[in-house]
Amino acid sequence: MYVTTFYSFKGGVGRTMALVNSGVELAKRGRKVLLVDFDLEAPGLDTFEAVKPKKTAPGIVDFVRNYLDSGQAPEVDGYLQKCPDIGDDGGELWLMPAGTRKAAYAENFRGIDWGDLYERRDGFLLFEDLKAQWKSTVQPDHVFVDSRTGHTDVGGICTRQLPDAVAILFFPNEQNLTGLTKVVADIRSESEESIGKQIQLHFIMSNVPDLDDEDRILERKIKAFQKKLGFKRDPLVVHRYDSLSLLNQVVFTKDRPRSRLAGEYRRIVKEIVRHNLGDREGALDYLKKAERVAGLRSREFETSQETDRKLSEIEKLHESDGEILFRLGILKQEQWESKPAAALFGRAIEQGYAKPQVHLRRARVLSDSGQLSEARKEALRALESEKLPLRSIKQALRLTDPDDSSRVAGSPAVVSLGTRERIGLACDAFFEDPKMRAAALLILESATADTHHEVVTDANRIELALVYIAARKFKEAADLLSRKRVENVDIHTAFNFAMASWGLRGSASSEEFAKVIEFHEAEDESSRLIGANYFQCIGLAYWAVGDTKQAMEYAKLALKSIDPNEQLFTCWRYSIVSEDAFKEDTKEMIELFSGNVLMMPRFISK
């Protein structure tokens, strides 16, 4: 239950209208909402047709009067009325009016000494009991309290004791600013009391004329309110709305939902909901915001004591909500707390939130905590979905067991990909981790087996050929790269074709490598994709055509051009390797170029 008081220092700002529209909107969305009329001097909530109960009922004044007469807090059931049904999502609207509209109302109201009630008659405990009864009887998601304007005897009850939040509506003039200064200070002082109650403040500028602010009058007023009342965000705005519908107290969020005024009331609802951690929408909003912060700070993310308190509260309030448990798990994962994250993901799955991303995240945190067997099972479960994005499929592949290669290759996630996507996935997987090579080859086999789907681009052919060469399928690689198959032969195609032929025949063809040199020397130096791997390849090509001097120079250039921040691919073994392995391969090539030893490249001889 989350209590929000709607307060204004002066009348004429549409406070009650805003409260009723906001309450009706939430009920339309499936929430259970209790409206409480605490504007005891000028009550009026029950005059709105949308919330009008079927019969007159006692209310706040009667409740207090009964307590003063009997000395015991009355049962609240008799002071609550259920309003007509609103919407189709199961929401409910309840009303606790100011009191019965009889001649005795004014006398009963004037007969209550609010100071004496609090000083001598335990008034504070009475209203704490009232709140507890609201919660146990109606079990509302939201309680909206309509408070009297100005400084009144009951003002503190509405703005300090009862609420979790106060929506302050004001017209931006000096009179409102002066009056609100003390009210806002009093509300904020609650955090300094022994219980340290933090009341959320929502500032809503209301009844604002829809005019050009060419002289910046409104802009200056807003800045004055922000400075004096201590808030930074621009206030929400409810514009003046000239319509005779207001005379009939039309509830715009119900009867005219597409109007601008209804949209402005919905923004008030959104702002209130996002601070209510007991509201599912509010909890998710807070968790997503926390995720963004955690994502930015990564390992350095440190939650404040208040954030930890709120996360614990969310978990307690929504212990059966799978999506919220999942979001809480993400935050634990971002904080490198693998075991709590795995537990939360597991609970999310138990509650029916078994989306592939939940299984995948659980697989990752289980792997991080050393539970490899369970991690592999979760990764396979993630791959059972056809809706898993390509990036997530790659992550899942890394976490699977090599013995499950056939299950991986035939999983719905992989099979649902297009031919080109499967080839790209398999090629990446093949070179990224030797443990994934078996699965990668099976994926390639299925991707290229269907005669209805051809690998149509040269980029696909070169990518696939690299895998075939590394897997010692030299004939398949040579066939892919032959001039009959490749439309635009370039230096990459020529080099890889020469290497595939070398593996197929057992000897390097000087004629085929001469074509590589021809491409190299024809290219403008500024347009070459130079780098360690490029220099290594060109060095090998020069050796194959008998120019050992150039071969040695390019091999040395390859060693000098190593960038520790980039992945290193070596043509000596057709694999992505570490810096040390790349140096080892290049030094073996230098031995070959010098004539000291006769050897085959590792991709052939392994």
Image (spheres, rainbow, N blue to C red):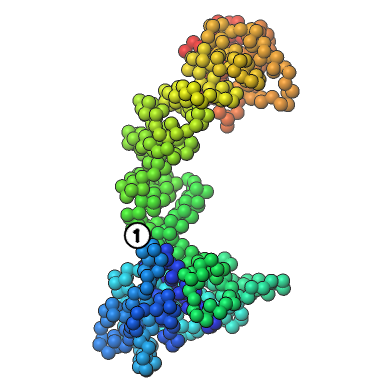
Which one is in front, 508 or 18?
A: 18
Residue 130: x and y in percent read: 32, 77
Where on the picture, by quarter, is residue 565? top right
The residue under the point 30% across, 74% down is 133
Residue 27: x and y in percent read: 41, 67
Which one is in front, 312 or 318?
A: 318
Which one is in front, 523 or 593?
A: 523
Which one is in front, 277 or 81?
A: 81
Q: Residues within 10 Å of mark 1 (few under 14, many from 20)?
A: some
Q: Quadrant of the N terminus?
A: bottom left
The residue under the point 28% across, 77% down is 77
**Does residue 50 appear to the left or right of 553 in the view shown?**
left
User: Can residue 320 be seen at all in this image of the molecule?
Assistant: yes
Residue 358: x and y in percent read: 39, 44
Residue denoted by label 1: 317
In the image, residue 602 above or below residue 131: above
Three-letter code for the amino acid on which mark 1 is drawn: Leu
In the image, residue 524 above or below residue 32: above
Where on the picture, by quarter, is residue 409? top left
User: Can residue 582 be seen at all in this image of the molecule?
Assistant: no
The residue under the point 33% across, 77% down is 81
**Does residue 36 appear to the left or right of 235 in the view shown?**
left
In the image, residue 346 above or below residue 40: above
The residue under the point 38% across, 83% down is 98
Residue 535: x and y in percent read: 64, 20
**Does residue 374 appear to the left or right of 287 in the view shown?**
left
